[in-house]
């Protein structure tokens, strides 16, 4: 009886197929409606949808404070902006490469990984991406809670005087935790919105966050009669760093570009999760090329200028690198008018944190978890699991200032850049931009992506070759392990070097040891990516599922 009951519960927990889907494909351990190639009915993101997405994932707390890291390398503001422009150009180029497979083949990052790493080995890049989804959901959620605290403080200043019963070792106050919990609870209903319908909220958040950022920028310039002390040659003294010169400057520029790439390496890796929702392939790429360089550069500049002017007017408050810290101080030293301004400005930043966390982290985590356990998880369930685990990670401790775990996550480009390299080089140079969609869901030797027992050993070796030269530098950065100076310099090239080495090694191995099925595509549109599913006999399910999808 117990066995029957457990099977009954297992059946109830399975993701339910919708009407008509069972005529096309049968849900199993490798496939459900959220990881199949998307049909036209679910590809709803147009040009304005992607404008909203690129802007909301750029204008937020992290984007605002990004300039601090570059100035900390000893770069002047002008040099930091040049580094940002160069990094954004590279980011756009690589995003187009990683988004191509989604825009043209309508598949997600986990499915793309199956075509390169093998049906079973694809779990490795998938789990790596999931770990970062948990981590960045946690940190962005904490930033959202801090924005919400200042937003509520503009209406109820007593929140700053709330009695704190937590010890100093908790790294937070009662008010901090209350606002983080409230932000998390308010996030939950947003996860009910399917990805194909979240485009309109993103456009709204894009508008509010952009207007707010530029308003603060203009206000700061007017109040400071310029950009403030950080804009001057001696401004780096405020950060306690010396200006970089000579070869040190050259390596600071290289490291600045590489760290800018590394900070967004998770987003680079899974761009196909978003481009697969495009109405037409040009929608994500044209808007990306126009928006991302402008948004990424201006948000950094606005953050630097606002921090600089605040240092001039509030010298006793320290450097206010986040918008919520700045707005808290503005209210502290202002009157009723300042409270009203803080209310609207911080309200916009609360929305911007939802704008980056829901589509950028929670839905990404949901998409990845869906492919980890398709029979029982869909995007919505995966997003809720991501949210729950992010809370359990205690972001207040992660951001305490001296956390090794966060240092590891910050250097995770060492592992993700080689994964990205294997995917891009395989798709463009080995498989010639072709995918056989049905083979992505066949876990047996009939699939051209089964390779050797579900593992493409070429990708594994290529990834190891990309990580190997960088790993000692990673240990030095995280744990202070002593390494030669040349190894440190290699680590400064972390993302581009790992990406290129792994990709080239994979192409060479694939030429020396050719893979089967290169250039093959399905003769029939089994999943209906161009309209109705096609088949030559019976149903599409007869043609595809019954004979092939047995693990």
Image (tube, grey):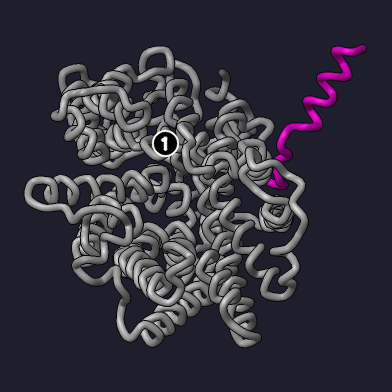
Would you say the magenta stretch is mainly helix, strand or loop? helix
Relative height, residue 485 to residue 525 (above, below)? above
Q: Position of residue 145 (x, y in %)?
A: 64, 57
**Quadrant of residue 25 within the rendered picture:** top right
Q: Circle 1 sits on which residue?
A: 407
Depth check, front residue: 137 or 461:
137
Q: Which residues are magenta?
A: 1-23
- Identify the residue at horizontal 32%, vertical 27% (top origin): 480
Q: Is residue 352 left or right of residue 303?
A: right
Q: Secondary structure at mark 1?
A: helix
Relative height, residue 365 to residue 284 (above, below)? above
Which quarter of the rendering shows the C terminus? top right
Residue 104 shows in the view:
yes
- Residue 10 within the segment the image draws in magenta: yes
Q: Position of residue 332 (x, y in %)?
A: 60, 74
- Identify the residue at horizontal 78%, vertical 25% (top origin): 10
**Quadrant of residue 542 within the rendered picture:** top right
Q: Is residue 114 left or right of residue 324?
A: left
Q: Position of residue 177 (x, y in %)?
A: 70, 50
């Amino acid at each position: 009886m117990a066995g029957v009951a457990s099977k009954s519960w297992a059946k109830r927990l399975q993701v339910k197929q919708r009407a008509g889907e069972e005529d096309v494909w049968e849900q199993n351990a490798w496939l459900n409606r959220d990881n199949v190639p998307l049909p036209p009915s679910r590809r709803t993101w147009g040009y304005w949808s992607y404008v909203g997405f690129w802007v909301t994932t750029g204008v937020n707390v992290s984007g605002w404070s990004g300039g601090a890291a570059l100035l900390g390398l000893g770069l002047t503001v002008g040099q930091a902006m040049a580094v940002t422009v160069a990094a954004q150009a590279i980011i756009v180029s690589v995003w187009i490469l990683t988004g191509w497979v989604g825009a043209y083949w309508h598949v997600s990052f986990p499915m793309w990984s199956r075509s390169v790493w093998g049906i079973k080995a694809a779990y490795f890049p998938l789990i790596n991406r999931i770990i970062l989804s948990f981590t960045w959901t946690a940190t962005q959620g904490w930033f959202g809670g801090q924005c919400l605290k200042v937003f509520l403080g503009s209406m109820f200043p007593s929140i700053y005087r709330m009695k704190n019963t937590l010890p100093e070792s908790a790294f937070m106050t009662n008010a901090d935790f209350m606002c983080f919990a409230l932000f998390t609870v308010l996030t939950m209903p947003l996860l009910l919105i399917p990805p194909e319908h979240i485009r309109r909220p993103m456009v709204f958040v894009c508008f509010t966050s952009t207007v707010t950022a530029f308003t603060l920028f203009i206000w700061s310039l007017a109040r400071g009669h310029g950009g403030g002390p950080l804009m001057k040659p001696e401004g780096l003294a405020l950060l306690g760093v010396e200006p970089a010169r000579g070869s040190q400057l050259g390596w600071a520029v290289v490291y600045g570009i590489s760290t800018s790439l590394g900070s967004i390496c998770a987003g680079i890796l899974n761009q196909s999760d978003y481009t697969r929702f495009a109405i037409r392939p040009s929608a994500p790429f044209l808007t990306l090329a126009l928006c991302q360089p402008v948004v990424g550069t201006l948000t950094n500049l606005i953050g630097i200028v606002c921090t600089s002017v605040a240092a001039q007017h509030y010298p006793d408050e320290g450097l206010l690198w986040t918008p919520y810290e700045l707005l808290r101080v503005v209210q502290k030293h202002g009157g009723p008018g300042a409270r009203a301004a803080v209310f609207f400005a911080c309200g916009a930043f609360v929305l911007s944190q939802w704008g980056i966390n829901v589509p950028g982290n929670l839905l990404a985590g949901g998409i990845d978890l869906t492919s980890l356990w398709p029979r029982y998880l869909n995007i919505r369930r995966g997003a809720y699991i991501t949210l729950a685990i992010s809370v359990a990670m205690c972001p207040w401790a992660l951001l305490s200032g001296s956390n090794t775990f966060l240092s590891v996550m910050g250097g995770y480009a060492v592992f993700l850049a080689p994964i990205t390299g294997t995917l891009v080089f395989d798709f463009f140079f080995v498989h010639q931009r072709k995918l056989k969609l049905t083979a992505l869901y066949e876990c047996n030797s009939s699939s051209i992506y089964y390779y050797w027992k579900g593992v493409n050993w070429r990708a594994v070796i290529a990834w190891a070759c990309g990580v190997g030269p960088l790993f000692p530098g990673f240990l030095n950065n995280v744990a202070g392990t002593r390494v030669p100076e040349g190894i440190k310099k290699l680590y400064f090239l972390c993302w581009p070097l790992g990406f290129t080495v792994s990709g080239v090694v994979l192409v060479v191995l694939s030429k020396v040891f050719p893979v089967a099925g290169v250039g093959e595509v399905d003769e029939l549109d089994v999943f209906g990516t161009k309209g109705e599913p096609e088949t030559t006999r019976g149903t599409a399910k007869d043609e595809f599922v019954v004979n092939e999808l047995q693990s």
